[in-house]
Amino acid sequence: MKNFKYILTILFFTLFSTTAFSQNNIAVLDVVKLLKESKAAISMKDQLNAVAKKYTDEDQKKQKEIQKQEEELLRQKATLTPEAFSDRKNTFEKKVIEFNKASQAKRKALATAEKDAVTQIEDEVEKIVKAIIDSDKITAVFRKSAIILGDTSIDITEKVVEELNKKLSAVTVKVTP
């Protein structure tokens, strides 16, 4: 009889806890897909790629100039005094250092602009997800990358992308080197 009461108690708590947990709704958001398919993310990538291409073209042009200057300096080595060559070599090295600093500043500005644009997208996505949580009575939203297996019916990615496309179809990318 004592074991019977114990089994009934465990059975009751098991059924009660299962019912309580079944009331909780969870959802999954595929952030990678969102950043591939949303208009805002595509707009951001296009703008960043255009600026990156511009910077790459500028850097390649400057690199060719620096290579020509280096070749000219090496040609002049035989005809210049050691002091004159040393002065020109130091001037050339300063140009190379300036070029490297400018290239690094451009890359940093591009990374900062990307971070700012992604933040704009994330802020809007957060608002959208909060609205979906309220309207669909969702208890928790997880990143799809954190889920091993799951029912596809809990994926709200399409819904979020659709809303994001309506509310934020493009972001302005500001790159300031």
Image (spheres, grey):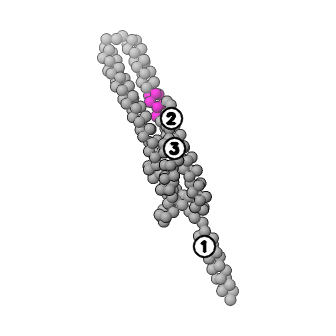
- First in sequence: mark 1 vs mark 3: 1
**SS majority, magenta:** helix
The amino acid pointed to by label 2 is Lys
Q: Are marks 2 and 3 in contact (CB under 8 Å)?
A: no
Let me know if residue 143 is in the magenta part. no
Query: Residue at left 68%, top 84%?
Result: 5
SS label for mark 1: helix
Q: Is residue 108 visible?
A: no
The picture places residue 99, in percent across and down from the top left corner, at 43, 26
The label on residue 118 is 3
The picture places residue 162, in percent across and down from the top left corner, at 49, 53
Work out how far the residue at label 1 is from the one at label 2, CA to CA, in angstroms: 51 Å
Q: Quadrant of the N terminus?
A: bottom right
Q: Residues within 10 Å of mark 3 (few under 14, many from 20)?
A: some
Work out how far the residue at label 2 is from the one at label 3, CA to CA, in angstroms: 12 Å
Query: Residue at left 54%, top 61%?
Result: 27
User: In the image, is 67 to the left or to the right of 90?
Assistant: left
SS label for mark 2: loop
Q: Is residue 24 above or below residue 73?
A: below
Q: Is residue 52 above or below residue 4?
A: above
Q: Which residue is mark 2?
A: 174
Q: Which residue is mark 1?
A: 18
The amino acid pointed to by label 1 is Thr
Query: Residue at left 51%, top 45%?
Result: 168
Work out how far the residue at label 1 is from the one at label 3, CA to CA, in angstroms: 39 Å
